[in-house]
Amino acid sequence: MTAQSRYAWVILGGCLAVALAGVGWLSVTAQRLHRVEQQARADAALGENARLALWRMELATSALIEREAARPAPDYISPGGREPFDVLHFQVSRSGPTATTAVGLRGDELRKLMKQLSWDYLQYVTQPPASVAAVSQVSTPAAIQQQRNEIEFNARNRFVQQLPSQAVLPASPNPKTEPRPSAGPMTAVWLGEGLDTLALIRRIQVDGVESIQGCILDWPRIRTWLLEEIKDLLPTAQLEPRTSPARGEEYLLATLPLRLIPGRLAKPPEGSAEFWPVLLSAWGGILLAISAGVALFLGTLALSERRAAFVSAVTHELRTPLTTFRMYTEMLAQGMVAKDQHQEYLETLHREANRLGHLVENVLAYARLQRGQRTQRLERVDLGALLAREERRLREHAAKAGMKIVIELDAAGPVVALGDSMAIEQVLFNLVDNACKYARAAPDSRIHLIARRQTKRVELRVKDYGPGIPREQGRRLFEPFSKSSQEAASSAPGVGLGLALSRRLARAMRGDLTLEPTQNGACFVLALQPA
């Protein structure tokens, strides 16, 4: 890896680190905002359901209070007329309490309760409930929720206080001289030392005597009944006695001194489960874009390195023949060469010209393939006839390296393949040229050209008996411009393009070019489709 490549990798790594850090920070921020939004949605949905549940319970309990308010005054001191949720009716005056038959209370419980129902105590607990005071204008979600609860409670409290008093009172003996008996509104309070007894109480005045009438309610049954009414809205809700002054942040009933604990919703609000798929999709897109960018960077870097290697190798490859051309032509032009050596000099110039022509031909052919220009339409090619036609040129080229060509054809009959004859000739010449370069010092100077028919393909083999190709070098053997300037200087002439071009030509003919492992030398196999 060159210093320029290392510098490019450092820049790429830094950019990726910054990009991933930024995307990670955005993901964490989005997740935090999503949790806030999800909590806000859940709180809003819970608050809406709680308000609906409060109104539903207010309507149900207001009917209970209205029925109790319509009860005639004598029923509070005489048995009978009990409602399903009534446990005990009582009346308390300054002289003491009076109670009817209790339902579900033992004698000691009743005596204890009646002992607590004093006039002064009931005077205190029958004060009308106060509305929740309005708060100042605020903008936080919790304060907005508190303000909504206060508005709802005050509205329901006004509704409860407007319930009419329908008590049926005894007629006055002398309506002209005595005032008409009156009854106050029915109020729900908690009684007892532990404030665990729910009662409905009203003030009443008969014949100038003021009394307090009321009934003890079956609190467990009422709680079960009300929770069943709102089960579809708040399945985990609970009801608790409210014995302290009302606070705006709570969900409170106005008809009964109860506090609603909403619990949790049965299912999260809509839209709360869409965040993670969107975030994962975004991360997938980002990683895909990063992968594409890295792949583009690698391709660009590899192309840049190949171009640099190509320029370096071509520069070295052109230096020797150009130097030979310049020196030999100057010597011939200045008459420095004896006449009997002219032929030798001209043959050298011709050999170097062929070498340059072969190099340029390979580069141009590779450029055509890179531009997508394939070979001509495939046709039937007789490999035996093609070898016979090219034998003279190949023998002359091999003879210059001190090697000889041996052609072997399939004895079973003509070897015919689908391909382009000009492309096959170019591949064949490149393979023979490589054998002449790298196997010229081998004890066995033969280059075998073997054409055979196989079961599903036709093979043209080029085998030499040179030093062979190491396995580690064989991995990048077919890569274009695989030679560096140092390799080009220390190896046989060439820029490392012949084999890459030959494989591309073979695949353009729907065939392939491979290196077959052998014990000695190198063997390249051009496989084509049979005709």
Image: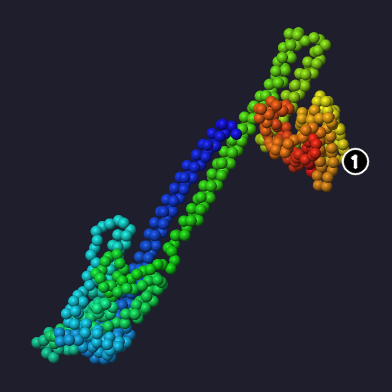
Q: Quarter of the image containing the N terminus?
A: top right
- Count of number-bearing discs: 1
Q: Is residue 482 left or right of residue 463?
A: left
Using the image, determine if residue 453 lies above or below residue 61: above
Q: Is residue 78 left or right of residue 413?
A: left
Q: Is residue 173 left or right of residue 492?
A: left
**Res 481 quadrant in image:** top right
In front of the other: 94 or 271:
94
* Mark 1 crowd level (few <14, some 14–19, many ≥20, 10 Å Cα): few
Residue 381 in picture, x, y percent from top left:
82, 38
Residue 41 visible to an observer of this rendering:
yes
Residue 72 visible to an observer of this rendering:
no
**Res 272 quadrant in image:** bottom left
Residue at 11 percent of width and 90 percent of height? 174
Residue 384 in picture, x, y percent from top left:
86, 36
Dot 1: what SS? loop
**Res 2 quadrant in image:** top right
Using the image, determine if residue 77 lies above or below residue 158: below
Residue at 73 percent of width and 34 percent of height? 499
Q: Quarter of the image containing the C terminus?
A: top right
The extreme left residue here reads 177
In front of the other: 403 or 30:
403
Residue labelled with disc 1: 411
Using the image, determine if residue 415 lies above or below residue 44: above
Residue 426 in picture, x, y percent from top left:
77, 32
Kind of residue indicated by mark 1: Ala
In front of the other: 257 or 404:
404
Residue at 61 percent of width and 34 percent of height? 303
